[in-house]
Image (spheres, helix red, strand yellow):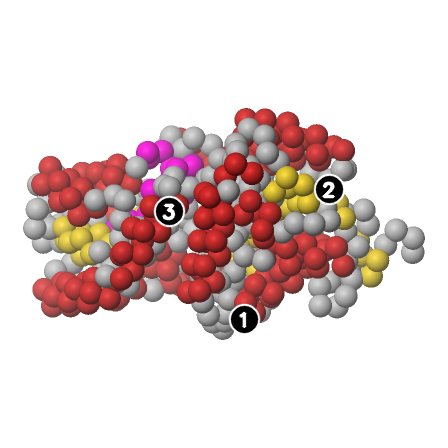
Amino acid sequence: MPGYRRLGSSVSDHWTQDRRILFLQGPLSPFFRLAGSRLKAAGCSVFRINLCLGDWLHWHGEGCVSYKGKPAQFGAFAADFMDSNQITDLICHADQRTYHKAAIEAAQARGIRVFVTELGLLRSGWMSLEREGLATLSRFPSDPGQIRAIADRVGEVDFTPAYPKSAYLEIVPDVLYNLANEFLWFLYPHYQRHTIYPPILEYIKGGWRMLRASRRNQAVARQIEHLKAEGCPYFVLPLQLEGDFQLRAHSPYKSFAEVIDTVFASFTKAAPRNSKLVLKTHPLDAGFENWPQTVEGLAAHHGLSGRVLFLDGGRLDSLFEQAAGLVTLNSTAGLEAIQAGVPVKTLVPAHYSVDGLTYQGALDAFWTEPGTPDEDLLAAYLKAIAGTIQIRGSIHCRQGTQVAADNLARRVLDLSVNEPGAFVEPPPRLDAARALGVPL
């Protein structure tokens, strides 16, 4: 059959024709390069645009070009590249980076299929892979009935934990990538990184915190033990990183300090007087923000001194057993809490913000009537996302990276991302998010 190549059984049994696939930045891992090799072996034409030296180190050679212009001109460059190379598919990691937003806009204007990856909702050992967008821009349904129907069509899913995380693969590729960009910046003089802190300073501060992590974790364990012994009801607020696009792009808040202020105001007004609010830092917090001082100041401002506990370390799940509820902006910590049976309230429409899974009323009412997650709906949601917008594999495990590359290539070739039936237009969370002031 001219123009077609049969795919190997390890990737897919479908036929392909004239697929011309463009990759942009991927995670700091061989993941995208390996997936590109699988797609090329299946008969696709594969291209890559490198935006910085770190990108080039991960993947260079045939089909790769470098963009060294200014960020503002990248959209036009990407559009011309797509036109001249007759691109049919675009693949990138995260959808809110400056370069990726411009490229996605150009692709969608041309009817080019867009696939976006991110760390998995089902952590760990999974990656997210969705069509067109993530989070607020996800096309995955938010209607409970649709979710149950998808779960019924998906079939059985193996949730057995796999691909344990390697600290080396989590840290070393990140350091090498950013140091190359910092010290040899003149090779890509106009590159604009998507992170908000200078990498070298972040490594210094983060390294110092890592050296003290054991002591901090021991202190937090004692704080949690004392909290549980008190027997008072408590709610949990996990902090999110200032540089997280879930805060920067998918919420109306400029800083997580504003989130804390919002939650404190509601807690003062409506929470039971004998209850406490527990705040916990993010595991990857490098210490740029002086959260203890911020929390203490806001607690005093709202008359909550003595009712707020700040935890700088430890494990979030150690709080779940006795927690009365968890409030989050939109963190995946909320999904972890739901899986532990903890009532959850999100401040903006997170992916898992589904009626029956999270509290849908006002924050003020959550403190006294949090409800409980629907276990059957939760099982359906997990099954539905696992079968349609999650793939097995991990960028922080050598074997997991190979598996993730296989699965990304297979799903892109099969056009089975968001299938069966897990793609709706317009994005079902977008209107509600915009009503809250989310700038998308």
Q: Which residues are magenta?
A: 237-254
Q: Nearer the viewer, residue 176 or 305?
A: 176
The residue that appears at 31% across and 56% down in the rendered structure is 207
Q: Of tags 3 and 1, which is closer to the observer?
A: 3
Q: Residues within 10 Å of mark 2 (few under 14, many from 20)?
A: some
The first of marks 3 and 1 along the sequence is 1
Q: Of tags 3 and 2, which is closer to the observer?
A: 3
What is the distance, in whole Å, between disc 1 and disc 2 at their CAs?
Answer: 32 Å
Asked which secondary structure carries label 3, the reply is: helix
Q: Amino acid at mark 1?
A: Asp
Image position of 211 (left or right of 229): right
The first of marks 3 and 2 along the sequence is 2
| In the image, farthest residue toward the right | 2
The residue that appears at 74% across and 32% down in the rendered structure is 83
Quarter that holds the N terminus: bottom right
Q: Which residue is mark 3?
A: 200
Q: Which residue is mark 1?
A: 158
Where residue 384 sits: x, y (%)?
A: 54, 58
Tell me the chief SS of the magenta region.
Answer: loop
Q: Amino acid at mark 3?
A: Ile
**Numbered badge on residue 88:** 2
What is the distance, in whole Å, between disc 3 and disc 1 at their CAs?
Answer: 40 Å
Q: Is residue 151 above or below residue 82?
A: below
Image position of 363 (left or right of 230): right
Q: Is residue 354 above or below residue 439?
A: below
Q: Amino acid at mark 2?
A: Thr
Question: Residue 391 sits in which quadrant?
Answer: bottom right
Q: Is residue 370 visible?
A: no
What is the distance, in whole Å, between disc 3 and disc 2 at their CAs?
Answer: 38 Å
The residue that appears at 37% across and 60% down in the rendered structure is 336
Where residue 344 sits: x, y (%)?
A: 32, 53
| Contact, mark 1 vs mark 2 (Cβ under 8 Å) | no
